[in-house]
Image: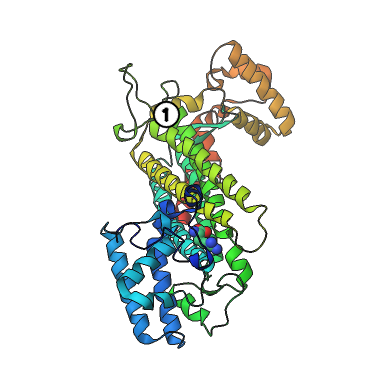
Amino acid sequence: MAEDIKDTKSSNQMWGGRFASGPAAIMEEINASIGFDKKLYAQDIRGSIAHATMLAHQGIIGTEDKDKIVHGLNTILSEIEAGQFVFSRKLEDIHMNIEARLADLIGPAAGRLHTARSRNDQVALDFRLWVKEELQKTESMLTGLIAAFLDRAEEHADTVMPGFTHLQTAQPVTFGHHCMAYVEMFGRDRQRVRHAIEHLDESPIGAAALAGTGYNIDRHMTAKALGFREPTRNSIDTVSDRDFALEFLSIASIAATHLSRLAEEIVIWSTPQFGFIRLSDAFSTGSSIMPQKKNPDAAELVRAKTGRINGSLIALLTIMKGLPLAYSKDMQEDKEQVFDAAESLELAIAAMTGMVRDMTIRTDRMKAAAGSGYSTATDLADWLVREAGLPFRDAHHVTGRAVALAESKTCDLAELSLEDLQGIHAAITADVFNVLTVEASVASRRSFGGTAPSEVRKQIAWWRARN
Ligand code: ARG
C-alpha cells in the first residue's frame, strides 16, 4: 500500500464524515500513534479475526464477507511481516492502517469488520494481548535467571564469604546462601508475574466504545478464541482500565530494583579492592586509555535501566491518575512506556543471567575476607552463652573486650592466646577455638533458612522442585 493511497487530504476516511477539512499538521503529529503502536499489528489482526468470526457466527455479518475479511487480514499479516506494508501517519494508528489496507484488498466487505466494536475496546484488547505475552516471556526469562543462581548456589554451597550489614563485615555466610537470597527475590517477582497474568486474563472486546452494543454479539466466544479465561464484566471499566499495564510496570520496577541491587554487588565485588569475582570478558569492557582496566559496564547498565523502568511506571501512573471514565486519548501514551520498560527489562534479565553464569568466583579472596573484621565475634559470644552459661548480654560485653584486645594487637580473634582470652573471662577454654573459624561459624547456623551448607542445600532442593 502506497502512503496516502486514499484521499485523506480533506478529512480522515475513517471518522471524517462530519469533518469539512483535514487536521492541522501539528494535530496530525500529536495525534498519530502509528510510529509506536504498529508493534501491536499481530494482536490487532488476531483480535479482528476473532471478532469477524464471532460476527458471522452470530449472523451479524455474512459468511462470505467474513471469509474475505479473514483472508484479507492474513494477507496484511504477511505483508507486515515481509516488511512490505507502508504505514501511514494520516491513518493515525495501527487499527486504521490495517482497516484501510483491508478496504484496498477486499473492497466494501472491509467496512463490516468494525460492526459492534470501537477502537476503544480494540486497543484495550490489542494492548492486553501484548502485555500478556510479555508477561509470559518475563516469566520464562526469570526462570532462566533463577536456574543460573541455583547452579551457582549448588557449586558454592560451601564457599565462605563475609556477610554484610551496612556494607560492613557482619558474620560469615556462604556464597551459595547469598545466591539463594536472589533466588527468593526473583522467585517472588515470578510469582507476581503469574498473578498479573491471572488478573488480566479477561477479554475486553465487545465493550465497544464504552456502553456495550445492541448487536447480539457473543463475548464468551471471542474471549475463548483469544485465549482469555472470560470476558470483562463492565464495559465502562473495560475501556478505561490500564491496570494491567500499570501492574506490568510495577512488577518490572520491583524486578529491576532487585536486578539493580545485584548489579551494584557485582560492581563492588569485581573491584580489585574486593576481588570476590572476575567478570568474563564477554560481560566487561576495557578502557581506551587505561590498559589495565576491566569495567563492569553490563552491570552498570542494568543498574541504570532501573531508572528508566521506574520512570515508566511513574509516567503511566501520572497519565492515568486524573482521568474521568471512560476512554480519553491520554491513554494512548500508555504504550511507549510499557514497550520501553519491557525492552529494558528483557535486556537487564538477559545480561544478568549471562553475567551470573559466566563470572568466576574467587573463593580464596572471599574466604580471606570472611575471616577478617572479627566476623566470628558472635560465635564467641554464643559459645560463652552455651558453654559457660553467661546471659547473652554479658557474653556480648566479654566478646567486645576480646575484640578490643585483638584490635590492639592487630590480630584476629582466633589468633589471641588462651591466656589472653582467660584474662578477659576465666570460663573460656581451648574448646572455644573450634568455633572461631569461619567454616565452623557457617556450619553452626543450621536454623531454618540459615547459612549452613546443609541448610542451603535443602533450600536449593526446594527450589529445584519448583523451577
Ligand atoms: N490510538 C488509540 C489509542 O492508542 C486508539 C483508540 C482511539 N480511540 C478513540 N476514541 N479515538 O488509544
Q: Is residue 410 visible to us here?
A: yes
- Residue 9 location, x and y as percent? 41, 58
Q: Residue furthest front?
A: 20
Q: Which residue lies furthest to the bottom in this view?
A: 59
- Residue 159 location, x and y as percent? 43, 36
Could you say which is closer to the camera, residue 355 or residue 111?
Answer: 111
- Quadrant of the frame with the N terminus: bottom left
Q: Residues within 10 Å of mark 1 (few under 14, many from 20)?
A: many
Above or below, 328 relative to 375: below
Q: What's the residue type where badge 1 is placed?
A: Phe
Above or below, 126 relative to 414: below
Above or below, 51 relative to 347: below
- Residue 255 location, x and y as percent? 51, 47
Q: Which residue is drawn at 33% across and 81% down?
A: 67
Does any atom of ligand 1 lie closer than 8 Å to the CB of label 1?
Answer: no
Q: How many labels does the image show?
A: 1
- Residue 467 location, x and y as percent? 43, 57
Q: Which colour scheme is used?
A: rainbow
Q: Residue at x 67, y 59 (%)?
A: 324
Q: Is residue 451 visible to us here?
A: no
Q: Which residue is drawn at 45% across and 51% down?
A: 339
Could you say which is closer to the camera, residue 240 or residue 369?
Answer: 240
Q: Name the residue under label 1.
A: 276
Above or below, 26 relative to 327: above
Could you say which is closer to the camera, residue 349 or residue 64?
Answer: 64
The local secondary structure at tag 1 comes to: loop
